[in-house]
Structures are given as C-alpha cells and as structure tokens.
Amino acid sequence: RKEVEQDPGPFNVPEGATVAFNCTYSNSASQSFFWYRQDCRKEPKLLMSVYSSGNEDGRFTAQLNRASQYISLLIRDSKLSDSATYLCVVKADTGGFKTIFGAGTRLFVKA
Amino acid sequence: NAGVTQTPKFRVLKTGQSMTLLCAQDMNHEYMYWYRQDPGMGLRLIHYSVGEGTTAKGEVPDGYNVSRLKKQNFLLGLESAAPSQTSVYFCASSYFPVEIGDNEQFFGPGTRLTVL
C-alpha cells in the first residue's frame, strides 16, 4: 500500500461546478498536510496547508480527518484556470526527513 | 528575485554518460532538495542538504551524487546514466526544514532528462 494515495482522475467538470478530491495516508504519525498545485509541465506550487479544524482560502476548502486518515480539497465555482494536477503532501514527524508526495489528481475544467 | 532556477531544462544522454544538473536559489534558503518525478508516482526525494557543505541521502539516492559547495547552489550528478534515470528532476529549497509545520518548499522549473 502506498503511503499517500490519491485518485489519479482525471476529473472532468464544467465551469462553475464543485469538485472534491480525497487523499488517504497510511502513517498515523503524520502531522502536517498540504495541497500543492502543478500545472502541465511546470513545477509544483503550494496551494494551501491543511489544518486540523479545516481551512478555507477563497473557493478552496481543505479538511483533515485524522480518524479515517484522509485529507480533502473542495473547489467551488470551478474556473478554467483551475485545470491542473493537485498533489497531496504529508509530513510524518517521526524523526528524520519524511515528506511524502501523492501522485496527484488531474482536474480538467471545461467551458 | 529569480527564485529557484535549474539548468539545463532538457537533456538527452546515452547510457553510461555523465552529467551535472545545477540548481540555484536567491532566497538565502538553508535547505535544498533534489526530487525526481515519474508518471503515476509522487515526487521522490533523491538527496537533500541542510546547509552549505552538507548533504544527506533521501529515498532514492542510488546512482546520484550531490554537492553543496555554496549556499545558493545544489548540484546533482549522474556518474553513469541509465535508462531508469529518465525522469523529470525538480530542485526545491526552503528557509526552514520541511519537517517543521507549514514550511513551504519552492520548486525550480524542472529538468527533463531522457537516457537512451
């Protein structure tokens, strides 16, 4: 089982739709969680951190469910410019360097 | 502010050839990282550095070497390239260790390497 798993998609949604992605992680010692965005043939960029109480940044909402060991990203009112791959990133503070990237979920928003 | 830059952007090698990828950052970051990204897999850490003159192995270090002679530069070397090293290589940097809280990593634009 992969340490961080994401549905690869692609998710094809129309403009204005609401779409949600989940990411599951296997290490219960994981303590920090993030969503990165990666445009086609570009580098990953931080989209948002994920806090225990859930957090929102404009149209984006991130949530953490420690009991079920997953994080989610909700995008409301999708824009064409939201088309990208969304990477889930999990840090396990077990001592030593342990940052795990998911393989990503591809999103296509169409007009 | 250029951020994190990488050279070259593209390279094709033959099996057994060697090359060096250069990463430079102008943000005065202590921590630098080299990752590879392959289809269907997340970014995997090759080597990292916690400061000038230091390097450490990551998840997939075999076949690679690194050096951090200057704080702003982090070099990744392939001594004898193999087809399995065909990948996209990303360099990243951060001010604090990535293990700490919300610390963000800043990535370079990537190097697309093909080994024939």
Image (spheres, rainbow, N blue to C red):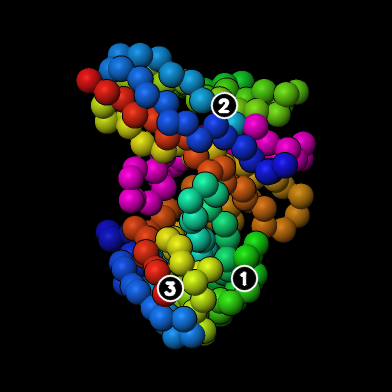
Q: Looking at the rendering, in which quadrant would you find the C terminus of chain B?
A: bottom left
Residue occupied by mark 2: A22
Q: Main secondary structure of the magenta part?
A: strand
Quadrant of res B1: bottom left
Q: Residue at x 35, y 14 (%)?
A: A17
Report the disc number at residue B61: 1
For label 1, count other residues whose C-alpha is less than 10 Å away and answer few (under 14), some (14-19) or many (20+): some
Amino acid type at image mark 2:
Asn
Q: Is residue B78 above or below residue B100?
A: below
Q: Residue at x 35, y 20 (%)?
A: A13
Location of residue A42 in the rendering, given as x and y in whole percent from the top left corner = 34, 50
Q: Are marks 2 and 3 on the same chain?
A: no
Residue occupied by mark 3: B115
Location of residue B61 in the rendering, given as x and y in whole percent from the top left corner = 62, 70
Are discs 1 and 3 less than 8 Å apart at CB?
no
Amino acid type at image mark 1:
Pro
Q: Please name which of the two marks, 2 or 3, marks the residue nearer to the observer.
A: 3
Compare marks 1 and 3 and give the one earlier in the sequence. Answer: 1
For label 2, count other residues whose C-alpha is less than 10 Å away and answer few (under 14), some (14-19) or many (20+): some
Q: Residue furthest left?
A: A111
Q: Is residue B65 above or below residue B91?
A: below
Q: Bounds of the magenta span?
A: A24-51
Instruction: Residue A31: say if magenta.
Output: yes
Location of residue B21 in the rendering, given as x and y in whole percent from the top left corner = 41, 75
Q: Residue furthest front?
A: B116
Between the C-alphas of marks 1 and 3, the distance is 17 Å
Between the C-alphas of marks 1 and 2, the distance is 30 Å
Amino acid type at image mark 3:
Val
Front-lying residue, A109 or B53: A109
Mark 2 falls on what kind of element? Answer: strand
